[in-house]
Every structure is written in C-alpha cells, then in structure tokens.
Image (cartoon, coloured by chain):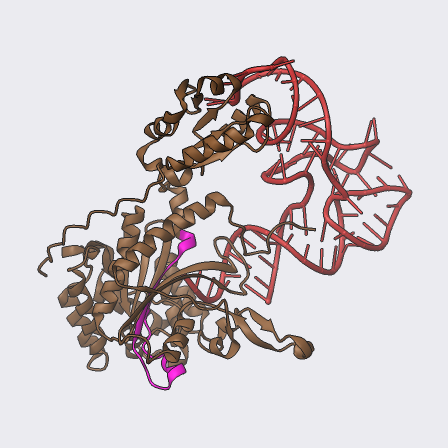
Chain colours: A brown, B red
Amino acid sequence: MSTKPPGGTRDFLPDEIRRREYVVGIVRDVYERYGFEPLETPAFENIETLLGKYGEESNKLIFKILRRGEHEASGEADLALRYDLTVPLARVVAQYQNELPKFFKRYQIQPVWRADRPARGRFREFYQCDIDAIGSTSPTVEVEQMAAVGEALSRLGFRDFKILVNHRRILSGLLNVVEIPVAQQESALIALDKWTKVGDKGVEADFAARGIDSLKATQLLAMLRNIFAAPDEVPTLAGVMISRARLDELRNLLGSRESGAVDCVAEILKLVRATPVAEHVYVDPRLARGLSYYTGAIMEIAVEGIGSLGGGGRYDNLIGTFLGKDVPACGFSLGLERIIVVMTERNMFPPTVARGAVDVMVTIWNDEGRGDGLALAAELRHAGLRVDVYPESDKLGKQVKYASSRNVPFVAILGDDERARGEVAVKDLRSGEQQAIRRADVGQFVRARLNPEHRREPREPREPREPREPREP
RNA sequence: GUGGGUGUAGCUCAAUGGUCAGAGCGCCGGACUGUGGCUCCGGAGGCUGCGGGUUCGAGUCCCGUCAUCCACCCCA
C-alpha cells in the first residue's frame, strides 16, 4: 500500500507549517491593518452554487461529491468542494446582505480544491489568500488592494516585484477595433496573456493556432506596441509606466465607447501615488488574466524570473448571479504556495522560522530523576523558554545527540552531582561550552544566551511607516 | 483531456536475458558505562509498483494496469 498522499496533495511537516504560518501571520496582519475582516466558508458548497461561474473549461475541474444513501447509485453529485474563495464570498454577500456593512471588506485564507492534473508547482489542494471589497465602484478600492498586497510582499522581504495593471474593457475595446469576433475574444485574451512568456513570435503562433485571423492579430499587437511603447523602457515618475499622452492616444483609438475604462486606469495611476507601493505599479497592455468573471481593472503581481505571485481584478456582476441585482466588487488573491517556494529558495525566512521548536532540552539521568527533570522543565517554561524533556532515562550521549539532531541549542543536564549541589550543567550545543549554573538562574542564563528573536515573547509591533509624500504627476 | 519518459532499500541511483539484486546518503548499535558534530567497525532494512505473457531462465523483453515526472491545454 502506498503511503504517499494522493497526487497533487501534500502532507505538511512541522518545518513547512512554520514557514506557512510565518507568511500567513504577516499577510493577515497587513490585511487587518487595511480594515479587512476575516471570513471562513465551508469546504464544500451546493453544486449549483459553483457550476457555471468559472467558464466551460473550469466546470470540469470542480471536485464533485456524490450523493449519499439511497441515491448513491445514481452517480449524481449534489455537493462540490470549493473551487475558489470568490464565489463563496458572492454567495455570502447575497445571503447576508442586510447584516453586512454597506462596504464589506473581507480576507479569507483557506484551501481550495481543483480536479486538475497535478503538475510542477500545481496542486489539487492549495491555499488561497484573498482580499475582496464589496459595494463600491471607486478605483480607490483597486488602489487600496494593490497597496495592501504590495505592503504584505514588502514585509515578507520582496523588493523586486511589479504590480501590473490593465483593464478588461480596454482589451475588449481593442479587440473590437480590429474586429476580432466576439466568439473568439476570450480565446484571444488567453493568447495575449502569454505575450510576456512566449514572446512576439510565440504569441503570433498562438493566435494562429486558435484560428484567429493573422492580419487582425498582427494589427492588434502592433496597436498595443504603439500605444504603450515598450513598457519596461519608459520609466516615469513613481514607476508608473504609461504617460497621460499615451492614455489620450488610447482614448482616441477606442472612440467614445470605452472611455470610462481609460479614465479608470488613469485614475488608478493617479491615486496609487498616495500609497507606499507607487514605485511598483506598471501598466501592462499584455495583461489579460484568465477568469471569465472579471469586468474591469485587472491586476497581477509579477516577480522577475519567477512569474506571478497573485492577481486580481474587478467583477461587478458575479454577485448579481446570486442576488438578481448587480453589486460591485473587486478582489485580489495571493498565491501562498509560490510565495513560500520562492522565499525558501531565496532563503528569505528569518532564523526563528528555520530553527527548531525547542530552546532547551532537559536530560533524564535515571528513573528516580524523572520527576525532578519535569520540575526543572516547568521552571524553565515559567521563565518563558520552550522546553523539551527527554522522555526516558538513557545514555547521556544519546540524549545529547538527540537534542543536537533536533537543533536544540541548549541541554540542561541534571545528574546526581548537580542535584546534590543545587546546580544544573548547561551545555550550549552551538559552541560546545558547558558550565554549572545555580538552578534558580538557569532560565535567565539560557535566555541571555539565546538571540533576542529566539525568545518566546510577543513581538513588538512595528513602528508605523512615515506617511509618504504624494508625488505630483 | 493529448503526447512522451520513469517505476529497484527511508532517499538518490547501479546491476550484457544468467549464482544469493548492490552502492552512497540516512537509520540503529558499538569503539566512547557523565556529553552531540569528525573518524572507524558492525547491523537492520527489498514479493525489483501490481497483473498477465514470452523464455530453460525476467529487475531486464512484450501487453495491460496503477503511480509518478516532463511537455501541451488550463490555472494560483
């Protein structure tokens, strides 16, 4: 019998949980500071809640739960594991519309499930870290979410990320200008989204493979290049990659029909200058994103050499499918798994996270000494240390070896001689030094020798940042 | 969902169709009965993924199946 977990799922061993909790702790703290409130929803939903919300392809990727009892043989499903956190949120908003505030901002960090084929870096069970804001169409919402996500990444130690912005209706407007038929537009957007990854030739080939008129495709790409120039080569104030003049050019090209979308992006660029993440924000005309429910601004976090760490956008009519009337909404999702992978590769976790769970281990001299060992452990715990007790009497060498293999920095040896003198032999396994300490002083002795961040004390909250001077455009 | 690769010890991998399937790392024990890392010595650990077939003989060849990895598709 195989003892591996099913494909696409993982067991999380202690070290991995510690890394995850470190990341989640920071993300949650930032989200709380931005006024988002916690929400959790069930692992599974009624199946009709999920079907039809993600597009044709994604319906197949929903994990369905067979009916139970006498209907089991029918093979029908009436429940399904949640596919993302956005649709359950939309359901919650529709259900509790009278109890939730007018502007409801929530964060949600829970696993989701997809019946996908597992691949490198892709799982069938994985965590999402979402923020969403319900009830306002103002670009303030997009800007605040970009700021929150960017600040979370900054506090995790990321410096080289970009927050890319585009607008779904600008894209569809451009597709209409070159007269790509509506039926092909979703497919065209998927192809366009890969432009950065596959390059000019690749994206043209992809358009062709999708049966899109090559003349129109070429025209579209040329148009985008013209409007935005090479985005990465036009740095402007505050890192914003598109000038007012180019936005005007875009406005002319689209005519009157999508001027609201251009205004929206212009507004976002203007407002973002008042946030700590202004220097990270770029307009990228190639950004399309897959999910079919986006209606407005779309955003994505990109890290050089890594790819996407998350993304989001505005979806003003998803809630309407539950409620009958549209409620504006905008959300952003961080890819927790990839963040952890990248931070592990780049060694971005502080030593406390990588280090073991125990500050000091009490050895057991013999069976008679077990009670006193437990008493010493209690004293050390009371002194604020994380303490393990070797569970049985054993050769001292094996006990020390065990502590060493678990990365425990200190061993407290309580032998017959020490007990007779009221002392404890404390050995620092990092240096090999050992000295006899009066029993009452052991806790203080060990704490003084642990690095400050190793102490089990509540963290001091960070000093708030200096408010950033808004730069004039 | 489509195409290809790989399944041998806990892990990474050897083994022309031919004795009893090996190595490194890890694990356990000893050298070292009051002290970890280094070194040396010893030990445990395998229905060679599973089922069938070819053959005097299969870890090796063939078919099926399952698992896994890579590419595509799609996505976080």
Q: Quadrant of residue B1?
A: bottom right
Residue A332 percent location from the top left of the image: 33, 64
Q: Is residue A166 visible?
A: yes
Residue A143 horizontal/vertical position (percent): 23, 64
Q: Can you give x and y, in whole percent of width and height, for residue A387 in the image?
A: 45, 35
Which residue extends farthest bottom? A324
Choose between A350 and A471: the one closer to the eye: A350
Q: Residue at x 22, y 64 (%)?
A: A228
Residue A446 on image: x %, y %? 37, 28
A461 relative position to A354: left or right: left
Position of A166 relative to A464 (above/below)? below
Q: Which corner quadrant of the image does residue A7 belong to?
A: bottom right
Span of residues in magenta: A313-338
Residue A284 visible to an observer of this rendering: no
Quarter containing the C terminus of chain A = bottom left
Instruction: Identify the residue at horizontal 47%, vertical 77% (top origin).
Output: A49
Q: Which is nearer the eye, A60 or A465?
A: A465
A103 part of magenta stretch: no
**Placement of A387 over or under A413, stated as above or below:** below
